[in-house]
Every structure is written in structure tokens, then in C-alpha cells.
Image (cartoon, rainbow, N blue to C red):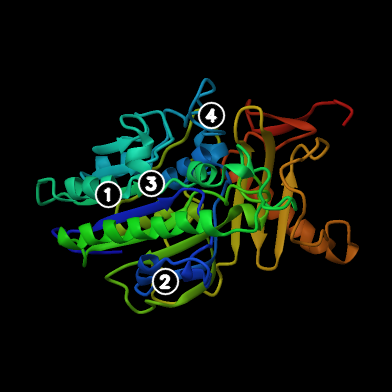
Amino acid sequence: MLHGANQKRNVLLIIADDAGFETEVYNNSAVHTPNLLSLAKRSLVFNNAFTSVSSCSPSRSSILTGLPQHQNGMYGLHQGVHHFNSFDEVQSLPLLLNKANIHTGIIGKKHVGPASVYPFDFAYTEENNSVLQVGRNITRIKLLVRKGTRKQRPKSQQAIFSVRGFSRHAQMWALAPQYGAFCEKFGNGEKGMGGSLTGPSKIHTRSSQGIGLVLEELREAGYDNDTLIIYSSDNGIPFPNGRTNLYRSGTAEPMLVSSPEHRERWGETSAAYVSLLDITPTVLDWFSVPYPSYSLPSSPSAPVHLTGRSLLPALVKEPSTWNTVFASQSLHEVTMFYPMRSVHQGAYHLLHNHHYRMPFPLTKTSTSKNLASDAAYSPVLQSLRQLLLKWQWATGDPWVCGPDHVLEEKLEPHCRPLYNGL
Ligand SMILES: [Ca+2]
């Protein structure tokens, strides 16, 4: 996409933590989210948006690199003694924007590393502040946005402000401790467990209030007509069948994209299948920054390229062929190892559990009927398997040969049998 060299453009990326569809934008009448609804009226609202991984740090790294977790290296949660990190050589979105002389900022939950891969010029995150203040205190968030947007910068520079706050899960526990430390009692059938919407709806209403404050700051700073705004979440809601599985309930995300330069479809909905892997290519397209050509040492034979796409064309015309998204999950915390890969194409969803012989306690029910053993769907199954394998090879997936084979990269990458009797 072309634009004049002196034209200023900005991006505001709002990632609500563990958010679902409990908003008026998605026709939930039990919660009051007027500011989000107002943003939706000048956005294209996607009804089939998916995260590529249903876990905080892996998802945030995928959003900020355009690479699935198995390719960027953030296999699990970043914090704590296990400190999962993206590979040192990964060319992330903030890194590419910095190189292009575009000012970047982040407010709220960051939860990715190392710092050298995710450099932000303006950062108020859990790394240097209380996450309660920068991720949940909406007044503090508003003041930080004011500070960031009004900071004097050379005219040639543009800005991306990634407000990644509005953390929800701890609030959920705090507001409803009777559900248990991990909300494991929510909706379990016991009296009082899951009947009330009061606690969760308070959180969504407060998120919407925060978004209203942030957008007001943007207007006050004069960025109203040159800012691309993207609203989404990082993973499924933190309830059973939500976060940490690759079923639709764990991966479907709200997604609003608002561009002042593309008003053709404001207030409309899109049925196109889109992924959080599309955010990096979308922002690069908005700024006309090309993606570099390089390889990662972890997978020298698979040159790094973005498998997502820019969403900007969808803001003008409904895409007719966007019907496929991929997902890849390996770990949440280090002990929660459930390697899965999936491809979702139209009505069909192939979910390949690499450790399918292990117990899988993360989800109690599937919302779909399992057609894998139905001979009538064998051609569909084969086609999806091939599609998924092709994506795994293209993205340098170290798990591509599992569980019965191991990937050997010497000379030509290939799968060698483990002879493990499985
Ligand atoms: Ca999260």
C-alpha cells in the first residue's frame, strides 16, 4: 500500500487479556460495552478471527512476530524459572518498526522476551511497573497513553502504541473467588458456580470504559484520522474449554479493525477466516515496511516468511477466498505439554494432537462431531492433513515428525523413525 513519504500514520493495537465475546459488539445483551460498540461502528468486525495459539506468551509472541510459537521459539509462558523466550534472531514487529524509524510504545502486559527481540521506545509493563497499575488501572492507562502520544518526536517519525492491558483473569478470580484459584469450579453444576454474570460482566464493562478513555486520549492528541486501530485478545477465555486448547472455544477471538482511510465497510461484519498471525503483516502493510529475507538458526532450511496476510484489503471488499487458518500449541506452563497443530478450513477443522496417546484433560467436550474415522470424509481428512503438514514444513516446525518420528536437519530435513513401539 502506497502513501506519501511525509504522511503520518499510526497504529493502536489493543489486546484485551483472555477476552471473549461478552460484548455488545457480538450481540451479548447481558453486558454493557458502549465504547467498544462505538469503535465497532467505525470498524470491520470479524466473526471468524482466531488466535494461532491459546496461551498468553506464545500468542503475544505470535501477534508481535507474525510467526507461530513453534517458529519464533516462545513455546510456553515467558515468566518464571522456565523463561521461555523467542529466538534471539527473530525479526519482530517492534524491531522492524524501530529499524524503519517508527516510534513504538507498549502499555500493560508484555509477557514476551527477550528484550532485544521486543524493543519498545516507550514501555510501561510488568517488567518495570506493577501490572495492577499499568494493566488494570484504566485511569493510569489513560494517563500513560496521554504521556506517550504527546511526547515530542521528530516529524518524520510515526507511532505504534500497543495497549496490551485490560488484564482479566486475575480480576476474574478476585471478583469470584468461590470459583476456585483457577476458576476450575466455574460452571461445574454445583449451586452458585457459574449462575451469575455479575463478576465477569463488570470486567468487560470496565475494559470498554478503558478503551473509551484510550480513544479519547488519541482524539485529544490529534491522531483520530491517521490511526489504524485493531482490537482483539490473546487467547480463549480462562474457563473450561477455553484457554489452552485448539478447539474453536479456545481459539476464536473478537477482532475489530478500524481504519480512517478505509471507511467503505465501517459497521459491517466479515465472515472471512483471519488469524492473529495476520496482525504483523497488516501493520507492516499500513506502514509500507517490507518484511526482511532471513533464516533462523533453529531451522536453516526453512526461510522465514509470514504465512499470515494483511487485513487491509478486507476493509474495502469482503474476501471470497479467505477460509483457512492454522494453529499451533506446544506448552502453557512447562508441565502442561500438549503439542497440537490444527487447520481450520470452512466447515472443517482438523486438530492433530501430537501426543494423542496421552491423557488430554484440558477439555471435557468437543463442540463438533469427530468425522476423522468416517470413510465418507476421508478425502477431506487427507486434504487437510496435507495442508497442515505443508504449513508445518513451511514454518520450520520442530514437531513436524512427531510422535513416532524425529526431525533430523542434517543435509536435507527429514523424519527418522524412533522405533519406539508406538
Ligand atoms: Ca492471556
Cα separation, mark 2 vs mark 1, equals 28 Å
Q: Residue furthest front?
A: 191
Check whether the beta carbons of the residues at disc 2 and disc 4 lie within 8 A of each other.
no
User: Which label sits on residue 139?
Assistant: 1
Q: Which residue is mark 4?
A: 298
Q: Earlier in the sequence, mark 2 or mark 1?
A: 2
| Residue drawn at the location 61% of the way across and 39% of the way down | 182
User: Which label sits on residue 44?
Assistant: 2
Q: Is the residue marked by circle 2 packed among few (<14), some (14-19), or many (20+) residues within 10 Å?
A: many
Q: Is the residue marked by circle 1 packed among few (<14), some (14-19), or many (20+) residues within 10 Å?
A: some
Q: Total of numbered circles in the picture?
A: 4
Cα separation, mark 3 vs mark 4, equals 32 Å
Cα separation, mark 2 vs mark 4, equals 37 Å
Occupied quadrant, residue 105 = top left
- Residue labelled 3 has its Cβ within 8 Å of some atom of ligand 1: no
Cα separation, mark 2 vs mark 3, equals 22 Å
Q: Which residue type does callout 2 highlight?
A: Leu
Q: Earlier in the sequence, mark 2 or mark 4?
A: 2
Q: Residue 400: x and y, percent?
A: 68, 38
Q: Which residue type does callout 3 highlight?
A: Gly
* Mark in the foreground, 1 or 4: 1
Inspect this view and state whether residue 102 appears: no
Dot 2 lies on which element?
strand
Q: Residue 256: x and y, percent?
A: 42, 64
* Mark in the foreground, 1 or 3: 1
Dot 4 lies on which element?
loop
Dot 1 lies on which element?
helix
Q: Earlier in the sequence, mark 1 or mark 3?
A: 1
Q: Which residue is mark 3?
A: 165
